[in-house]
């Protein structure tokens, strides 16, 4: 098992603006100043932490069995994602409950600022996830790896969230848990699966469902997408 804190670097504000629906358009001075202020604030309170663990897996009729645990990840989507893989990385990421508190407080007083903080926080989570993928590539260089498959993507149900977190000991290691409705606590968090194979893995387009902003993305609300 790998568990650690991680240093949050400069955030990709262009990515945050893309989440906000700016596309390739530059923000005006007021919005840019607000972005800078919100990023500085986020850096001051975020405490990014992660945990991941590598498991042998077996594709079974109902989905994917995580060997030496009681966890079976049901559905055809996860079977397709891990087809040909001998192992899988189960990972959890959070940037702390303090960020949730900041968002709740700001939503009461300044919704514009809250939306910007929310977008920047999603960029921060993505940055941490990308760093973990790089760690995995170095630690398990003998394996090819799939892209991150989030719990809840496709027909992989959210109701495995609690068992998934228990298997990687996320509640104890990084303070990441699931509510009775299977939502992550803190909310600015991610759970995901990465397949590992010594065979070549065909890369496919990831789509909206793997994106941290899928529930609030301006593009999706307009019926479009950002082409990532």
Image (cartoon, grey):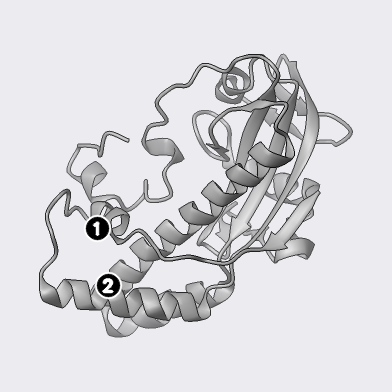
Whether tag 2 and tag 1 are in contact, CB under 8 A, the answer is: yes
Closer to the camera in the image, 141 or 126: 141
Closer to the camera in the image, 138 or 114: 138
Q: Secondary structure at mark 1?
A: helix
Whether 92 is drawn above or below 145: the answer is: below
Residue 172, percent across and down? 79, 64
Whether 66 is drawn above or below 31: the answer is: above
- The residue under the point 21% across, 78% down is 33
Question: Mark on residue 35?
Answer: 2
Q: From the viewer's perspective, is 123 left or right of 36?
A: right
Dot placed on the residue nearer the N-terminal end, 2 or 1: 1
Question: Mark on residue 17?
Answer: 1
Residue 189, percent across and down? 55, 57
Q: Is residue 5 visible?
A: yes
Please tell me how crowded label 2 is: few (under 14), some (14-19), or many (20+) other residues with Cα within 10 Å.
Answer: many
Q: Is residue 107 visible?
A: no
Q: Extreme bottom residue here?
A: 109
């Amino acid at each position: 098992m790998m568990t650690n804190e991680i240093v949050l670097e400069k955030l990709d504000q262009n990515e945050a603006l893309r989440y906000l629906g700016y596309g390739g358009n530059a923000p005006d001075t007021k919005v840019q100043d607000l972005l800078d202020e919100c990023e500085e604030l986020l850096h001051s309170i975020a405490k990014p932490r992660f945990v991941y663990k590598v498991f042998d897996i077996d594709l079974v009729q109902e989905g994917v069995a995580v060997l030496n645990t009681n966890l079976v990840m049901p559905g055809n989507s996860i079977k397709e994602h891990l087809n040909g893989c001998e192992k899988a990385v189960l990972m959890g990421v959070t940037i702390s409950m303090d960020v949730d508190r900041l968002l709740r407080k700001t939503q009461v007083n300044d919704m514009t600022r809250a939306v910007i903080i929310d977008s920047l926080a999603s960029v921060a989570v993505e940055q941490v996830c990308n760093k973990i993928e790089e760690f995995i590539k170095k630690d398990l260089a003998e394996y090819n790896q799939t892209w991150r498959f989030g719990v809840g993507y496709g027909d992989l149900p959210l109701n495995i969230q609690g068992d998934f977190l228990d298997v990687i000991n996320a509640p104890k290691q990084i303070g990441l848990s699931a509510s009775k409705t299977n939502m992550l606590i803190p909310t600015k968090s991610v759970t995901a699966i990465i397949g590992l194979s010594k065979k070549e893995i065909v890369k496919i387009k990831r789509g909206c469902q793997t994106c941290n902003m899928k529930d609030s993305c301006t593009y999706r609300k307009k019926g479009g997408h950002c082409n990532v």
